[in-house]
Image (tube, rainbow, N blue to C red):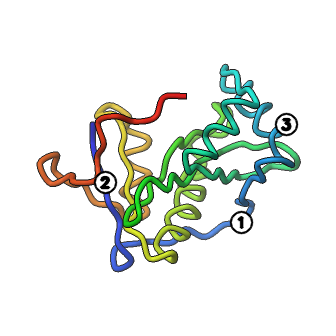
Amino acid sequence: MIHFSCRPKNFIPTAGGGVRWLDQEADFVLAQAYWRELGQTLTRKTWDTAHQFGYTYAGLLAGSRIVSCAAVWRYSPQCWEVAAVSTLPDFRRQGYAKRVVSFITEYILSSGKLATCGTDDDNLAMIATALSVGFQVVPEELVWWNFPDMPDF
């Protein structure tokens, strides 16, 4: 696992519109269609539980379709995570995840929180995306915000 953090002085905003917050009620069907295209099932219970655990999702839309998505996870009073980053296969390598990650990161930093992010060591796309918006690698021994008992829903 690679851990990252981003502070205002390191943040590199990304230009480009189309990213917006997804409303828990009004956008459930839209989110459900997106998850289906990724080969996953999104139930109403899972969606609502994620929101109860502090997740709020944002998506980059092309027409009426989400093509890239991420969430802010408000897991502590000091730190919020850029989480659940994904892009539909046909829309990858076009900078869409970077735009969504930048949108979420800007929100976290403007809220006065430390922006964190974590990914698997072999997730080269996410590593490149995080670095491109100003996240810096944090050595494992310095990761004080990591919790071993993550919510499972």
The span from disc 2 to disc 3 (Cα, nearest Å) is 32 Å
Q: In screen coordinates, is 58 left or right of 84?
A: right
Q: Can you give x and y, in whole percent of width and height, for residue 146 in the image? A: 28, 46
Query: What is the quadrant of the N terminus in the image?
Result: top left
Q: In screen coordinates, is 17 left or right of 124?
A: right
Which amino acid, by three-letter code, is at mark 3? Answer: Val
Q: Residue at x 82, y 42 (%)?
A: 65
Would you say the residues marked 1 and 3 are in contact, meaning their CB atoms lie under 8 Å apart?
no
Would you say the residues marked 2 and 1 are in contact, meaning their CB atoms lie under 8 Å apart?
no
The residue to which callout 3 is attached is 29
**Mark 3 residue crowding within 10 angstroms, few (<14) / some (14–19) / many (20+):** some
Q: Quadrant of residue 30?
A: top right
Would you say the residues marked 2 and 3 are in contact, meaning their CB atoms lie under 8 Å apart?
no
Circle 2: element type:
strand
Q: Can you give x and y, in whole percent of width and height, for residue 19 in the image? A: 70, 59
> Which badge, 2 or 1, comes first in the chain's sequence?
2
